[in-house]
Amino acid sequence: MSLKSAARIRITIVACAVAAVTALIAQPATAAPAHDNGALQHGIDGTGTDAHPYLVYSPSSIRRDQAAPLVVVVHGCQTTAAQQMESTRYNRIADRHGFVVLYPDVDAIGRSLPWPMTNCWRFFDPASWHRGGGEAAAIASMTRSVMRSHTIDTRRVYLIGMSAGGFMASIMSATYPDLYAAIGIASAGAYADPSCLYGSPVTRPVDDSARAAYLEMGSRGRVVPRLVIGGDQDQTVPPDCQARALDQGLMTDNLVLARAGRKPVSLVPTSIHQHLVPHGHSSTVFDYVDQKGCLLGQRWVVHGMNHYWSGGSPDRRLAQWTDPEGPDAAEISWDFFARQAASVGSQCL
């Protein structure tokens, strides 16, 4: 999940590495047991080197005759779908609230990238920044496969990603706004802005990234509520990079609202409050609410946390991916998602 070991790695070098492994053969996927109260299914989308394995968790609390929400949880580098499932403990939230969880995994190329980019989504590849291309198309295809095989409420499909998966979340918001009602970004940055890693002084202006995301939406453009969470001690995706992820989303939303002749969402938070975890990290929470009182943006700054999934499993075997002393990002993201439903504009529940 973490990119922190790849200090100041250059995106151009990574792109060359991607090109060098395009002929590699897929390896079989493996998965850890769910350890929860529902059913865990293995799936695969695509063929050959383009095949993407995935896991689907269906809690026993859902009814077959009633459409359930779907949450797509996208891992980062050096992580698998199974490890993301175990480390985030998202299944227990699904048990409690009755929704399906999809954990996508990378293809053979992603699994074969040289360390530290092993198992990495190619968020840095411009081919993945557009609808129907690269990793964006793969994640959308896996999402749709689960929507066909399960009874899913099509207005309540959400996506959250960690690190490289978080960059993919920014991409999916622009490329498939008609598919995802809201997105979550954990320890990652804005749309088509991989250069913000490691505090690089050469970054894409946020208003440029916002307009590019708006243009990518095209006729499918809609307000996509966005949650951003990350640590203020993150040495891989610095806090200002995370802040641009939130600002880009709100600015893109405002371009959509302007086209519809509606008032923009203020880039100044509507409210700010502190969240305390007993014997853990405190957080500052920024809320952004529209004219109708809908929560369209939220940012959690976890004080003292490096490049980790906030909260999650305390299992020491998963310690390289999670910081259990942080607030529970699975709980936080579901609370945010549960307020949102897809519509032509935006709609909060």
Image (cartoon, rainbow, N blue to C red):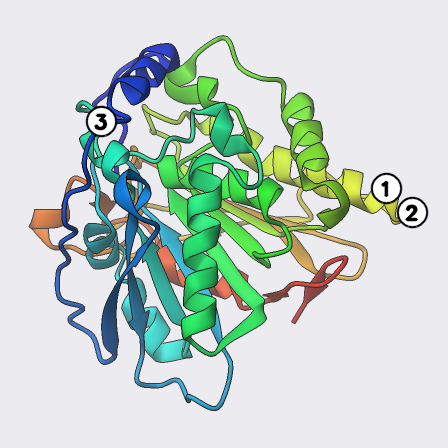
Residue 7, which numbered label?
Answer: none
Circles 3 and 1: CB distance less than 8 Å?
Answer: no
Circles 2 and 1: CB distance less than 8 Å?
Answer: yes
Q: Is residue 232 left or right of residue 341?
A: left
> Is residue 268 something that shows in the picture?
no
Sequence-earlier tag: 3 or 1: 3
- For mark 2, give the secondary structure: loop
The quadrant holding residue 154 is bottom right
- For mark 3, give the secondary structure: loop
Mark 3–mark 1 distance (CA, rounded to whole Å): 42 Å
Q: Is residue 165 left or right of residue 219?
A: left
Inspect the image, locate mark 3, and give the three-letter code of the amino acid beneath it. Answer: Leu
Q: Write down the residue under mark 2.
A: 261
Residue 232 position, x and y percent, is 39, 32
Inspect the image, locate mark 1, and give the three-letter code of the amino acid beneath it. Answer: Ala
Q: Write down the residue under mark 3.
A: 113
For image coordinates 41% across by 79% down, the residue present is: 98
Q: Is residue 93 shown above or below 138?
A: below
Inspect the image, locate mark 2, and give the three-letter code of the amino acid beneath it. Answer: Gly
Mark 2–mark 1 distance (CA, rounded to whole Å): 5 Å
Q: Write down the residue under mark 1.
A: 258
Residue 335 position, x and y percent, is 49, 65
